[in-house]
Amino acid sequence: MPQEDPPPDTPEECIDRTENSWVSENSSGCGEMKCFVTAVTLECWGHKVPELAVVQCHSLCLPGREATPARTINRTVSDSGTLQLPQQPWQGEPIHSSYYNPFHNFTDAPYSSQSFSHSQQVFHPSGGAPGYGGGGYGFSAQHPPPAAYRHNQLPAPSHDFRFPNFIENSLGAFERPSYGNPFGGRPFYGVQPPPEQGCPTKNYGPCQKSKYRTIDGSCNNLRNPAQGTPNTKYNRLLPPRYSDGIHLPPVSVTGNKLPGARLVSIVLFPDKPIPDPVWTLSSMQWGQIITHDMSMAMGTTQTKPYANQCCSADGRLTLPSDRAPGQCFAIEIPDDDPLYSKFGQHCMNFIRSTTDVDRGCAPPHAQPHEQMVTVTHYLDASLVYGSDDQTAAALREGARGRLKVDVRGGRQWPPPATNKSATCATQDDDEPCYRFGDVRANQNPQLTVLQIILLREHNRLADNLYHLNPHWDDERLYQEARKILIAEYQHINYAEWLPIFIGTNNMVKYGLLYKTDDYVNDYREDVEPNVLNDHATAAFRYFHSAIQGQIHLIGEQRKPFGALRLSDFFNRPGVIEDGDNMDSLTRGLATQNQEEVDPFLTSEITDYLFRNGMPFGRDLRAIDIQRGRDHGLSSYNDYRQFCGLPKAHSFQDFGDYISPENIEKIALLYASPDDVDLVVGGSLEKHIKDTLTGPTFLCIMLEQFYRTRVSDRFFYETGNPHIGFTPEQLREVRKSTVSRLFCDNGDHIQYMQPEGFRVIGEKNPLLPCDAIPAIDLRYWKEEAHYGNDFPAFDHYFKK
Ligand code: HEM
């Protein structure tokens, strides 16, 4: 019997016939405008079916010289299948120049096809030596390097990185290697879905003279008001090592695949529970708070499984490239995997992060793609208040400066999440799922406890300020409470938390911490606040090692009386409201030891992450490794050199900081020392004295937290009379500790040790909460209104 042709919309039989081409347009004033056209076409049973065309046009002028601003235009194909070129192509919003011109910071060279070595043209952040470029390092050539490297005249990296040539590397001349995804993904471009929301075109200037920071971080930097705002790019210390120089994930220097991320995770990062002898679980948990405040990669969801699937529904197969979504970069699971093989799993879903090109902010083939951050880059408690005005407004009560809470059982709880099923993995309708300034806040119970404590602290501050200054309106109370909360939080970060992880002496030496009772005026307008990709995608993730698999519930006598298995409570915060659990979990944070920071990770996150009732989940370490490749991070060896360690020529050369056993395993997994992933090598290093990290990650973190501090015009220690505190207020803010936050915002916590990040001991005994220093808010009483007990304050607010 003759077979009937299948209907043309049956996807299985379609071949991707996407074509790319360049179109030139004349633009007045500065020559040519290049348009890159991606015409997405499927051929199904011999018929071509045009689906979509994306047209991206870019002026080749330098900022300041351009007569016609660059535009991004997306056009769909008409029903007849012909591409509708825009009639008046330049009517859209201008793209901010820094999104598409990689040279704007440091060279006068035209944005042209000229190939050059950045090592000759770009200021190197490590002590003035020339070095790599590639997307804004935060320091222009006119300015001195960050303090963290002033001591270190590092040589320029020998690797002669060349930016992919704009024209030569464009289609036709550019020979694309066969797709570098070893696990059956597909090329990122060509079959790319349309940009998510288009390139952000928000115009932030002119800035108001305000004594409070904006919610989205705009106008913190008055010269460049958009800096540090959400939906902008990560910065980088080193250029990406994409295998095609543009966006394909890296491959080995031999041209073969890198070892599978899950395999590396199993071999090098097993589970070996060793409690940290000194630091409590609150240290780990506060670190996640800092992380969530500073960055969230766009396009990744850290709570719910992805909607897009790169694996077959049963996890047995990686979908072939022509059937998987374009952003797939699935993690291959070895056949003899100790856990997943029991369930026939061969494929772990993984979706690549969204980049500037996906958003239509840069042409696909002109320069390496850059990932984007969806929250404010500043340490500004955006996880409490939100990163945009709409979220911030929705979180406010609208009276007396307070944030919205629901009162149940006489206790304040956050308002419900607007989209519960998209946010939480709750099992029945009554289980709470909360709304905060950050969408990840329900991810694990201890994280949610800290979020609740910060929320309650805001309301505690607002209530006290209201009693002191009943004439202040809602806005004034909200802003003053927010300003104090951010200051307390920044003080805890820089004076209490960071010294544990990166060492007090290092912080003092490199200008991250000042031993003074005075103001510290170290603001630098020339330093970019943007979080470093190298930091967020590798270095700071090292502390995933400190996560505990079992969360203790602890009574007032500090006796554990129960424990929660972490993987039973991912995205299920309801357990916090049960009985006395809010306090039991808070005491647990300050009592239970964190896991030692070392190359071991609990299987609760390497086998059971987000398992949601299943017998297996995801592997966070494999994800960390895969994410580093997705973001094209340079290799561990490159960062060693960047940070002043000798570049390794053999695996044995890693022996200065990595144990012989781990070197042996690395040598079995990787083909060359130049292949080793940053997150892998850095996580295996011996620690520098008085820190919880090895030299490579220490170097990256010092750099990050130096930038975060000095790029924040509102940093709490500023002596700027318009935006800072009075000397008396600053003295009070400097009393802030994590233990005081626990005492003030638990349900009825009675005792705490003074140093909550450190385990209870002879020098850090359990004390009644009254004995823990507290901020005296009377210094915020407005004396202009009530008399003049606090003249310094009066001077401040009369400005
Ligand atoms: C129970 C605790 C934690 C869990 C379950 C957890 C889980 C996760 C997950 C699922 C991601 C996203 C992975 C991806 O798709 O790439 C992530 C990202 C990250 N985590 Fe954790 N994490 C925890 C604690 C921490 C801690 C303690 C730190 C550091 C002190 C940390 C630092 C980071 C960083 C820097 C990122 C990248 C953020 C970005 O998108 O820029 N995490 N974590």
Image: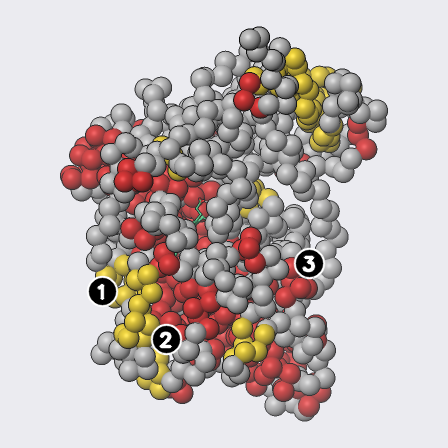
**Residue labelled with disc 1:** 277
Pick whichever of labels 1 and 2 is earlier in the sequence: 1
Q: Quadrant of the N terminus?
A: top right
The residue singled out by tag 2 in the image is 584
Query: What is the CA distance from the residue labelled 1 to the residue labelled 3?
Result: 44 Å
Label 1: element kind: strand
The span from disc 1 to disc 2 (Cα, nearest Å) is: 21 Å
Q: Which residue is mark 3?
A: 390
> Exactly how many numbered labels are in the figure?
3
In this picture, residue 593 sits left or right of residue 495: left
Nearer to the camera, 516 or 542: 542
**Helix, strand or loop status at disc 2:** helix
Residue drawn at point x = 72 percent, y = 84 percent: 471
Q: Nearer the viewer, mark 2 or mark 3?
A: 2
In the image, the residue with mark 2 has its CB under 8 Å from the nearest atom of ligand 1? no
Packing grade of label 3 (10 A; few <14, some 14-19, many >=20) is: few
| Identity of the residue furthest to the left in this view | 660
Q: Residue at x 49, y 50 (%)?
A: 304
Q: How many residues crowd mark 2 within 10 Å: few (<14), some (14–19), many (20+)? A: many
Image coordinates for residue 323, horizontal then vertical, percent: 51, 26
**Amino acid type, callout 2:** Ser
The picture quadrant where one finds residue 749 is: bottom left
Residue lying furthest front: 1
Residue located 45% across and 80% down the image: 747
Within the image, what quadrant is residue 220 found in?
bottom right
**Badge 1: residue crowd in 10 Å (few <14, some 14–19, many ≥20):** few
Ranked by sequence position, the earlier of labels 2 and 3 is 3
* Separation of marks 2 and 3 at Cα, in angstroms: 34 Å
Name the residue type under label 1: Pro
Q: From the viewer's perspective, is residue 230 above or below residue 350? A: below
Q: Earlier in the sequence, mark 1 or mark 3?
A: 1
